[in-house]
Image: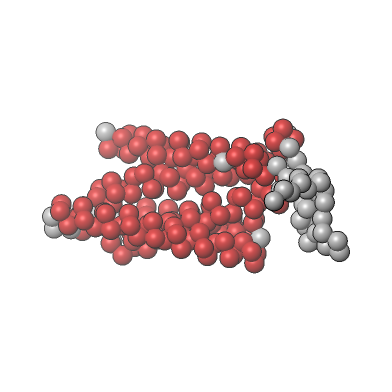
Amino acid sequence: MVSDRTPQGWTPRGWSAPEGSTARGSQLTWSEMLKNSTFWLMFVTFAFAAASGTMMVASLASITQYQLVGAFSDTTALAAFAAIIVSISTLSNFVGRIVIGAVFDKLGGYLSLFIIFAMTMAAMAGLALSGESVVAFTVSVIILGFAFGGVLVVFPPLTSANFGVTNLGINYGIMFVGYAVGGFIGPRLATTLFTEENG
């Protein structure tokens, strides 16, 4: 079968765009998006969200073995628990993607981001204050993994909502550079801070 490219701006007969959508509004090119202040706010937000999540993902096993060293009688048990914690974090990340996706559909992107950042801050505080408590540490990891899972769910539709769907492929590709920046900075920052504190 042969099909023609749909004309730009075409919509089905009798269809109207939902209130607040960009389906009949701005369909920005990547160069136009880069000139938009909303893009840079989202870009920096994406980078910060990625930094906190990738910092934890990259170093979770090491953080677990360092922070909970006094909670286990031998290093073998501690190493085994560290492996379990990594699996728990991955599972909570998976669940977070599904749940935050549903939250996005109900509440929208900005409120979803607020929830993600609130959970991230609570989890980071929990990790800092949990000491050698296995339960508190585990709960904090679950919350952080859950919140980090929602980050990648929120930004694609948020990008299309702000800049349109016509050029979403390249626009989100550029937006995703923010994630790469955060992923580069986060783990290195964690290593630097750990080295400075512990020599």
Residue 65: x %, y % from top left: 24, 50
Name the residue nearer the viewer: 65 or 170.
170
Quarter in which the C terminus is drawn: top left
Residue 190: x %, y % from top left: 38, 40
Residue 58: x %, y % from top left: 36, 44
Q: Is residue 194 visible?
A: yes
The residue shown at (66%, 47%) is 159
Coloring applied to the structure: secondary structure
The residue shown at (59%, 54%) is 154
Residue 134: x %, y % from top left: 28, 62
Q: Residue furthest front?
A: 1
Residue 141 is left or right of residue 41, and the answer is left
The residue shown at (44%, 57%) is 93
Residue 48 is left or right of residue 174, and the answer is left
Q: Residue furthest left?
A: 74
Q: Is residue 122 visible?
A: no
